[in-house]
Amino acid sequence: MKDFDVIVIGAGLGGLSAGALLAAQGRSVLVLEQADRIGGCCSSFERDGFHFDTGASIVEIIKPIEDVFKKLGTTLQKEVDLIPCDPVMSIIRPDGSRMTIPFSIEKTGELISSISPEDGRRWKDFVDFYSEMADVTLDTFFSMPADSMTDLFAMLGRQPRMAKYLPVFLSSYQNILQRFFKDERVLQSMGYQALYFGLPPALVPGPYAMIPYTEQMGIYYPRGGMLKIPEALQRMGERFGMQVRLNTTVEKVVVRDQRAQSVILADGTEITARVVVSNINARTLYQKLVGEEYLKPISRKGIRSYAYSKAVPMLYLGVDYEPPLEAHHNLIAASPEDINQYWWKHVETGQLDYETIGLICWPSHTDASLAPKGKHVINLIPEGFYNLAEGNWDDLKEEYIQKELDYYSRFAIPGLKEHVQYVECSTPLDYERRLCLPEGAIYAFQQDLTAQAIFRPAARSKNIRGLYLTGASTHPGGGVPSTIASGMIAANLIEKYEQ
Ligand SMILES: Cc1cc2nc3c(=O)[nH]c(=O)nc-3n(C[C@H](O)[C@H](O)[C@H](O)COP(=O)(O)OP(=O)(O)OC[C@H]3O[C@@H](n4cnc5c(N)ncnc54)[C@H](O)[C@@H]3O)c2cc1C
């Protein structure tokens, strides 16, 4: 007799989504989280009356999340108060000029036409192309397992129109953008979003060039902070009896006869379960918690081959004025080519650039309750990376904060430095320590074509029976909707294979 039907390691979005759905299947579920709060990268905390988000700052492409809540017998909109972000974003160009993208396909088309009439006409073609593709892929690619070729054929069986879009996978984000648009200023407004997938435009697979379109399907912020999404998943799971234990680190997954049997906690306690679901980085899972000796040689080689995804630093600022910004998301943008150059020159060499592209997030623009009256919260997310050519993030941290405050005050947010009341910074090293993200990898592994779908670690372990994966490490990859979808994929597989 096992202690639980299912143990979930990690209370990130993937773990909570899988846990809640498995509890709804009538299984006894225990979620173990090493941190003192749930949500992992999608969480929130409070300091001096300012409410900050730990990592994720918006949610878009909400269809997979709606599907999960529907399966839990409710709706996303009932459980989370999602505020649409309008305008969609503001673009701060390298010359300092700005462009505000409205939440309207037509008005965005008019804006693009005012810059380049030809690109304005092409915007309509772009929208037509990606609206159909989004329809097709959201129903399949983002909601079905991709552990094998059979799974891919099953996707095609369910949605034969997907075949039309397969060549797009062989193209890059940059190629697709440049196929539709020619004007440098228009390209500057769409290139940065490639980095939402953790790579520069030249390396992100073509399907993700749908982002400038999907942004027009809505970008949302949960009233009260990003934590409201994992909280809703936890609440739903608990309705079905799911238990969540915080401050509980899993150190080992015990395997016998190539089947997961139990987990061992940091204090030595062993808890047995019929099924173990991992929401942690798959390399950490297989190399440290399970042990490579349980993997077939090809899988051992495979797991070692995954490169960690990008890492970023994040500055959390509480300010006592209304910052001169235009939107919830403000991108310090550049053309796709310049973003590629930044990547080769800095990320690949570890040479930090303090005055570079980045994201300014202004959540209290959308939800004033996040800060005391008359005050605001801002998150700065300058592009960065884990491995520095010189020194380490701990030694650099104070200097880094000051240099970034200088740059952002000068270039993007006049007056910022004088109005900062609270400042804290999570470096990639801090993310590694606090959330056990190896090398601070925010999307687990790089998301180029070689680590997508069947090439990403499988949701149903190919080596260990009774072991399932959720979260950014597995298909469909990193991001709020994808990781929540991964929980549904794991829960469906467990329903099928673990009676
Ligand atoms: C700075 C930043 C900005 C981002 N911005 C966005 C955004 O705006 N929009 C978007 O869609 N996505 C964004 N993302 C990505 C998105 O937040 C993540 O991809 C997603 O939340 C990851 O979910 P996950 O299920 O993989 O779990 P994780 O968030 O990785 O959580 C895993 C959990 O497991 C716990 N854990 C680890 N090891 C153990 C152990 N041994 N025992 C017990 N518990 C353990 C961790 O503490 C953690 O809570 C951002 C991420 C970051 C970091």
Image (cartoon, grey):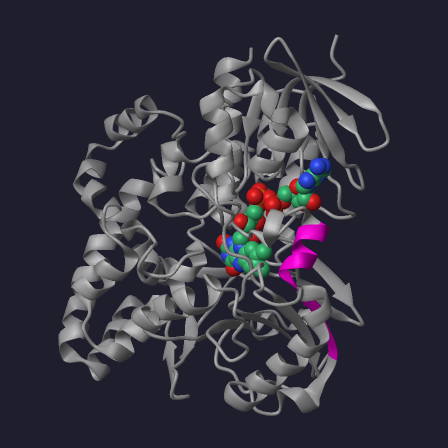
Q: Measured from the top left, where is residue 398 in percent x and y?
A: 72, 75
Residue 219 to residue 400: above or below: above
Question: Is residue 328 shown left or right of residue 136?
Answer: right
Say which residue appears at 73% left-offset and 60% top-offset: 45
Q: Quadrant of residue 169?
A: top left
Q: Measured from the top left, where is residue 13 in percent x and y?
A: 59, 43
Q: Measured from the top left, where is residue 52 in percent x and y?
A: 68, 65
Say which residue appears at 61% left-offset and 28% top-offset: 277
Say which residue appears at 53% left-offset and 20% top-offset: 494
Residue farthest right in this picture:
267
Q: Quadrant of residue 123?
A: bottom left
Residue 262 to residue 82: above or below: above
Instruction: Please give the range of residues in magenta.
Output: 422-434
Whether 425 is among the magenta residues is yes
Front residue (pair 301, 10)? 301
Q: Measured from the top left, where is residue 468 in percent x and y?
A: 55, 25
- Quarter holding the N terminus is top right
The image shows a total of numbered marks equal to 0
Residue 171 to residue 26: above or below: below
- Quarter holding the C terminus is top right
Residue 148 to residue 68: above or below: above
Front residue (pair 299, 36)? 299
Question: Is residue 490 shown left or right of residue 315?
Answer: left
Question: Is residue 49 shown left or right of residue 77?
Answer: right
